[in-house]
Image (spheres, rainbow, N blue to C red):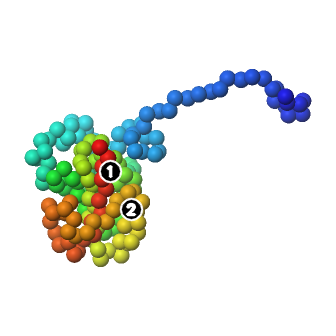
Amino acid sequence: MCSKTCGVPDVPHAVITQQPSAGTEGSSVGLITAPPVISQETEATRLTTLPLSARVNSNVKFVISVSKDVDFTWQCKLLNNNLLVDIPAHLSVYGSKDSFVALLEYAETGLAVEHVIVRLIKDQKELPNAVRLFMFFGFVALPPTHPLLSTVSGDSTKYLHLAYKIDS
């Protein structure tokens, strides 16, 4: 019981409840819409309905708008139902982390790939920070002889590869 000094009457009140809004799966920020990976729904549908044979070795470019004036481009390849992402040498560009999260979410929900593999150039000076960032996302380092890298072209001594397994 509240005394007269507290200034608020001690009366029963109803509990206010609010239904949680359904956000994008995997997004911890509560986005209501899908990540802005492809601007037109017809393009997204066309990409996901390709037969697996057409998705074995295809180049894909994602352009993600992170603000009104800034777009971020990710060069990727679809290889045996895995997405290989070439990471630029200067990853600290504004919005790169947010756009990569959008790309990762789209790979999981829109492309239905089994793994996302990132390829980093070993001699870049921000390599330790980039590796730390991708390990925070759940990526693990792959040895050059790993079976996932059997279809990846390029000098394995020049690149460091990290992989993320998409949960089915």
Q: Report the residue at 16% width, 55% height from top.
A: 79
98 relative to 10 in the view: left or right: left
112 relative to 98 in the view: left or right: left
Quarter of the rendering occupied by the C terminus: top left
Q: Report the residue at 16% width, 52% height from top.
A: 80
In this view of the protein, which residue sits in the foreground, 110 or 135?
135
In this view of the protein, which residue sits in the foreground, 35 or 111?
111
Q: Report the residue at 85% width, 34% height from top.
A: 6
Q: Report the residue at 32% width, 47% height from top.
A: 167
Among the 4 quarters of the image, the one containing residue 118: bottom left
For label 1, the residue is 104
SS for dot 1: helix
User: Can you give x and y, in whole percent of width and height, for residue 5 in the image?
Assistant: 89, 33
SS for dot 2: helix
User: What's the residue type where badge 2 is placed?
Assistant: Met
For label 2, the residue is 135
Residue 146 visible in the snapshot = yes
Q: Residue furthest right?
A: 4
User: Can you give x and y, in whole percent of width and height, for residue 44 in the image?
Assistant: 23, 40
**Mark 1 vs mark 2: in front:** 2
Q: Which mark is residue 42?
A: none
Among the 4 quarters of the image, the one containing residue 17: top right
User: What's the residue type where badge 1 is placed?
Assistant: Leu
Among the 4 quarters of the image, the one containing residue 161: bottom left
